[in-house]
Amino acid sequence: MRATVFIGAGTLLLGGFAASQAGYLDWVWPQGSGTRLVADNMTAQLQDTAPSQPAAGTPSSAGPASQPVPSAATALPRNTVKVDESALRYFAAKGDTKRLDAEIARLRALYPQWTPPANPLAVENTDDPQLDAMWKLYSDGKLTELRKAIADRQTAEPGWQAPADLLDRLAVAESREQLVNASNLKQYDAVIRIGSVTPSLLTCGDVDVLWRVAEAFARTQRPDRAKDAYGYILKNCDNPQERVATLQKALPLLARAPIDDLLAMERKGADGKGEFDSIRGDIARQSMANADADSKLTVADGDIARVQKLASDGGLVSDDLLLGWYYVRRDKAQDAETWFRKAHDKEDTADTAEGLALALVNLGRPADAEDVLYKWRETSDDVRKVYLAAVANLLAITPPPPLDPVVLQRMSQEVAGAKDAASAQQFGWYADSLNQVQTAAQWFQLALDWKPDDEPSAYGLALALWKLGDKAGVKQIQTAWAGRSERIPTVGLPSVETSALGNRMVIRQPPTRDAAPQSQTYVSPQPQTYVAPQPQIYAEPAPAAGPAQAERQAERPAARPRRAAAPSGCSSTLDPAGLAPEQALTRGWCLMQANRPIEAAAAFDVALRGTGKTQSDAAYGQSLAYMRAGLTDMAAVSATKAPLDSNRRIEIKTALLESQATTAYNRGRYNEAILALDERSRIAPERTGLMVLRAYAYLRLKRYDDAEQLFRAAAATGSHDALVGLNSVLEAKR
Amino acid sequence: MRRFAAILFWLCSAVLAATAASTPAGAEATVQPSEWNLYKARFLDPAGRIVDNANGNISHSEGQGYGLLLSYLADDRGDFDRIWSFTRTEMLVRNDGLAAWKWDPLAKPHVSDTNNATDGDLLMAYSLSLAGAAWHRPDLTSAASAMAIAILASDVERAGGLLLLKPGSVGFGAKDRKDGPVVNPSYWVFEAFPVLAAQVPDQTWSRLDEDGRKLIATAMGIGKAGLPPDWVSLRAKPSTAGDLSNDFGYNALRVPLYLLRSGNADGSLLRTLRQRMADEDGNLLVVDISSGEKREALSDPGYRIIPALIACALDGRKLADDLKSFSPTDYYPSTLHLLALSYARRRHAECL
């Protein structure tokens, strides 16, 4: 048998260990202009001009790394060097041109003076079917079986030696597998070690291996070595796709300075166009995107100019958005509006509308923002936040602008749907400023229901009740807030009302866009479908809808179906126990419209004493009331108190399961969340928001493939949450 | 001075043991070709991995180590090479040069846990060293040295005044567990130490050998069973290790086999083990350490041969026919069976 190859590999392995203390890889990519791989047998020129082998950690001279290489000075005719060409014949016979070419390239590098045979098939047939079978195992990648075949033959035929060529290639192929496995398992030191003892792996013929070694350097805090490895490819390898891919690989792993060094190795085509043109654009985009994630980052002017040019020339909405987000994060709202406007004009999507609305809010144009974003408000939590910020800012304008009743009504629905206390409070002040005191009181009360510790709303409510002459109500609030507010006790004292206006300046800042997913605190959208009648606060008749308005309405998603106008007369407090069931039912719905769900539930309880439809309506109403109050368990019980028709049964059941899923998720019980969603999906289609919730549950359970599939599906519907989630999965899967 | 003498003695016995375990090239193999063929037909995948058929058909570093050792003992170079090729390319991928312990055909990547298992590492290094010397294969010898060095660098710890083998590089130490450090007495492949000491001379090997024997003696005093448990906590007074097996069970049952195969075992210790680990019918008992109560009687010939082999070694008692012949059952007992038979052939032909 031929032992030298094995000696070589083994000694090198030991050498790796022995030298590991002293940076054993220093010799792999020597610094300086003479950069090359030790014993790289791909490039003959390099061998001719090679500096002497670096000393430290240099392996012993045995092994494939030191195949005898004829001196360049002696030009030898073909066949004076004995070259094993049997592999050529084999690959040619099989018609495996890829391997044939690779083998010719390899032999050429190994023996620079060797000329490939014109017809590989004419290479003398060794007439050794066993050896042919071995080459077949090699080309089929059955390396372990090839090992066995060689050893078996050596046992059977003492003295038989496998061709050195075959052994070399087998050893290299094994090392390649080992390296790729180590790389996939993030064992980066092992990757570097294997690469360093198998220098013949590190060639342009297998750029993937070079990429993996470079990544291993980068991930073990050796960016200089990583840069050298990428640089080696750019210096020596010619495949255009691989050259571009090399920079793409380096991009996320290296800092800008080494990336710029690599870019400098660009080759120009005959047309003078650089091969990295497109990459430079991506790099500029990436630095803009990084700056979006971190507002402290500064972006080179050149990058901004490049992206601007790309946006102007190429017309990609994504480039407009990059610029918009960049400027909005740097308080340049005017520039942000310019770019978001371009994007929005090209494509009216949730993303473009969100950005434009944010810029408009920052420019002090919340009405425009509201108008732009209304149709997208349900797309995602982020969009809804921006929408509600527009609403809050719009209502906070002093003096209050006249607002289209249609707009007011839809805003009120959204605020109620989102249970957004800040906006409800602004509605309160807005109504108050229009002298709609009763309405103001209702909004302040809503704000307090949603955020019981909201002192400004309590103050506003106390003021409104004072104006309404409800001294008992004022007293109640003052008692509740005793010691917690300085101004609430002053309500009713002279001159206090005039200070009310000053309180309207509590304006919510528009949310900043979270670049990183808030993975731990994912809060699913609240169930929306079962939301009961909205408070009917703006009672003014809507202006007759002209054609233009009707058209505008038609473009928007239909507003939530409204129930029949509720009978008035539940503003007073009264014990429902004395009411007849039908009266109690009416009062229950009225209280629901006033968003006083707990009182409504009590009224429905009385109504449950009725029979037939009254009883059924009462059970339905009470279930909705408890659900709105967040008392899911009680809602479930209510739904069983009387027979419901199938639509209502499904509506309640759907909402309950949804709530159950959300609660389970938020408590970290992901399996239960999925079970609830499964059950829900059997009776109602799964909305995008719930699909995202389910995907997050899979993510938490490390069912990454399931999560990825769902996120992708949800992202395809334009869900930004899904996109954030998808990135989390891809990150987790890495 | 005493210590030095002890080392000298130990080195001499090491050479003897190494000779005893090795199969000189051309000499009759101690695992017969027919046995190896039966074994490999059942447990060796053509790609070179030993399949643990009772454990979801996964492979592990222990199995690869056993595969290397058995194919060496069977003098089957082809199979040895293919097992080694698989092991090297698929499992020898850790940064520290040790083997990832678990390879799952259904997982992606196949290595589903990159932690190592020290017994697997030892079995591999040991087998590579034997094969490299017997078959004049410097590549195997070099790989053996590299693994031996990695074992010394990563698999050894000091605890309770002893030099011990960590079961794996993570998960068992004082910082990893409330009852850590935890060790596994059956990870001491005693026969490997003298061979590896010849491969990579270092006093650690003889210390591991000595202290491993002390550990086993101590571990036998932990509970009423009077047998070593599968896992031992050395946090304070040696004890069983909470959530890990509290039995003399599937791990520890190979301790006597390793002691025997290492060639210089203590007769009275072996006799005690023999007495406590088998029932009247020669079945191998799994015993609860603290109560000493029997939990299971294992009747697979691969288990039964272990107490029988002690009786053979101590008293020259013949092995029963069903133990002398080999037919594969499950990966683990079948492996132990062949190791036991190989030892009997080499050292106690009178029992066959």
Image (spheres, grey):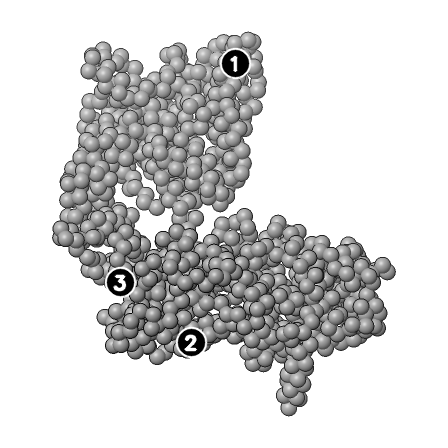
Chain under label 1? A
Q: CA distance from mark 2 to mark 3?
A: 26 Å
Residue B28 appears in the figure? yes
Under mark 1, the amino acid is Asp
Please tell me whether mark 1 or mark 2 is closer to you in this view: 2
Under mark 3, the amino acid is Asn
Q: CA distance from mark 1 to mark 2?
A: 87 Å
Which residue is rendered at x = 49% and y = 17% of the image? A648
Q: Residues within 10 Å of mark 3 (few under 14, many from 20)?
A: some
Q: Secondary structure at mark 2?
A: loop
A310 vs A394, nearest the viewer: A310
Q: Secondary structure at mark 3?
A: helix
Which residue is rendered at x = 25% and y = 34% of the image? A352
Tags 2 and 3 both on a single chain = yes
For mark 1, what is the residue? A645
User: Which of the two labelled residues, at mark 1 and mark 2, occupies the earlier sequence position?
Assistant: 2
Count the labels in the image: 3
In the image, which disc is placed on residue A62? 2
Tags 3 and 1 both on a single chain = yes
For mark 3, what is the residue? A236
Q: Residue farthest to the bottom?
A: B1
Residue B51 lies, in percent from the top left, at: 61, 54
